[in-house]
Amino acid sequence: MSLLLQGKHVWLREMTPDDLGAVLEVYNSHPAYNLWRNGTAALSLAELEQEYKAMLDIPSGHWMIVKTVETAQTAETAQTAETAQTAHAAKPEPKIIGVVHFSTAHPSPGKGWIGLFLIHRDCQGQGFGREACSLLEQYCAEQGCSQLHLGVIAEDEQTLRFWGKLGFEQYRQVTAPVGRLTQPVLLLAKQIAD
């Protein structure tokens, strides 16, 4: 059974290879991020497939897509209704608005790690990222994590502000590989359980 995290406005579900095309749109809505990590404004499908396969090997790791509830409900209805073909014809295809990769025990038990958290540029500022993060925090705490960690490219001030508003605090700066490039990364953490 695949992991499904349900909130009021967003759902997170396990990503599959069939989602890669829509996830590529999410990545490519962030050309600055792609430049910081790969030196090019756009990521190719082949590069995304390679990253997806490499991160599947991380213990207790999860690739998740983020959908709005309306989109997720439309998809569920279309899959379960006898008139699935009619439902698909009448409504637009579900749209993935974000992608997340996280682990509940890597590199050490009790520490959850968010390796990737992207919400499509057009869907930012609407509370979707905040709710998706809250769902991740709840799930990681249920899995025995007392802290949630992540790294942010030091130049990415907008992302640093987002995580700061959610209660994450910087505890170290390192130089680390991010994508194909090595650069300063700020490590952030938040206490999510006692």
Image: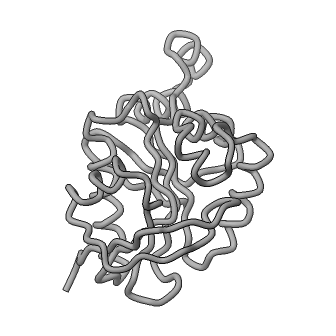
Q: Position of residue 147 (x, y in %)?
A: 31, 79
Task: State which quarter of the image contains the C terminus.
Answer: bottom left
Which residue: 57% across, 18% down?
88
* In the displayed structure image, the side of residue 67 where residue 48 appears, left or right: right
Residue 84 vs 53, above or below: the answer is: above
Which residue: 35% across, 68% down?
139
Q: Image quadrant of residue 117?
A: bottom left
Q: Nearer the viewer, residue 193 or 69?
A: 193
Which coloring applies here? Answer: one colour
Q: Position of residue 115 (x, y in %)?
A: 51, 65
Q: Position of residue 21 (x, y in %)?
A: 68, 36
Residue 55 vs 108, above or below: the answer is: above
Q: Nearer the viewer, residue 17 or 54?
A: 54
Which residue: 60% across, 79% down?
59
Residue 110 vs 173, above or below: the answer is: below
* In the displayed structure image, the side of residue 160 where residue 33 appears, left or right: right
Q: Nearer the viewer, residue 18 or 132?
A: 132
Q: Nearer the viewer, residue 22 or 72?
A: 22
* In the displayed structure image, the side of residue 87 where residue 158 appears, left or right: left
* In the displayed structure image, the side of residue 5 where residue 84 appears, left or right: right
Task: State which quarter of the image contains the N terminus.
Answer: bottom right
Which residue: 60% across, 40% down?
23
Q: Position of residue 75 (x, y in %)?
A: 50, 31
